[in-house]
Image (cartoon, rainbow, N blue to C red):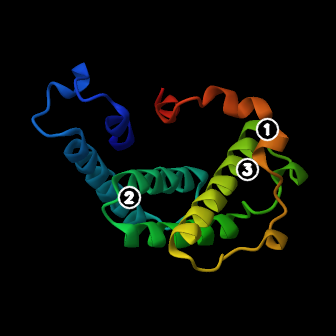
């Protein structure tokens, strides 16, 4: 919801019920997601694909809001650690898993890489991961139709 409010026009009917600006509404939803993530982490430190996707969404919001650049570094490091621990850097086509799960794993890994490279580009530092450390194929080579449904960032919310 925090990202969706960012993309809504200022005069959108969904924003009429709020007194705050869409930036303030987005920050409020982001704070709610931060609280729920902290609660989840106190209950269980198990890694999951849903956790990776949530952290990617958090990184997306942080890059849009530009409020806490240090948090982007933190999320980047956690995503790389979790992704490599889950084996997302290995191509899932070599294991027996459902095709949709394999695509989600590829999608998550390459978005982790895109996040890492964009943070590196902005800060002029070296990359944490080298291409030789990854065996996963590029998502767009594996399944071109996967991206056809994502014409706008809010399409993920539908």
- Residue at 33% x, 43% y is 2
Outermost residue on the top side: it is 13
* C-alpha separation, residue under disc 1 versus residue under disc 2: 28 Å
Q: Position of residue 80 (x, y in %)?
A: 61, 69
User: Where, quadrant-wise, is the N terminus in this rendering?
Assistant: top left
Q: Is residue 39 left or right of residue 76?
A: left
What is the distance, in whole Å, between disc 1 and disc 3 at their CAs? 11 Å
Q: In the rendering, at what x and y percent does residue 68 appear?
A: 33, 66
Q: Is residue 110 left or right of residue 27?
A: right
Horizontal and vertical percent for residue 147? 68, 33
> Which residue is disc 3 drawn over?
106
- Near-viewer residue (44 or 94): 94
Residue at image x 50%, y 36%? 153
- The residue sitting at the right extreme is 94
The mark nearer the N terminus, 2 or 3, is: 2
The residue indicated by pointer 2 is 37
Which callout, 1 or 3, points at the residue further toward the start of the chain? 1
């Amino acid at each position: 919801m925090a990202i969706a409010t960012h993309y809504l026009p200022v005069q959108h009917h969904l924003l009429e019920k709020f007194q705050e600006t869409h930036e303030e509404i987005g920050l409020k939803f982001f704070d709610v997601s931060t609280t729920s993530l902290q609660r989840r982490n106190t209950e269980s430190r198990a890694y999951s694909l849903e956790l990776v996707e949530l952290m990617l969404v958090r990184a997306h919001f942080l890059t849009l809001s530009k409020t806490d650049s240090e948090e982007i570094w933190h999320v980047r490091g956690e995503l790389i650690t979790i992704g490599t621990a889950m084996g997302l850097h290995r191509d899932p086509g070599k294991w027996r898993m459902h095709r949709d799960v394999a695509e989600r794993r590829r999608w998550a890994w390459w978005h982790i890489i895109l996040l890492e490279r964009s943070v590196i580009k902005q800060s002029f530092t070296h990359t944490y991961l080298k291409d030789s450390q990854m065996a996963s194929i590029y998502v767009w080579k594996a399944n071109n139709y996967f991206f056809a449904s994502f014409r706008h960032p809010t399409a993920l919310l539908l």
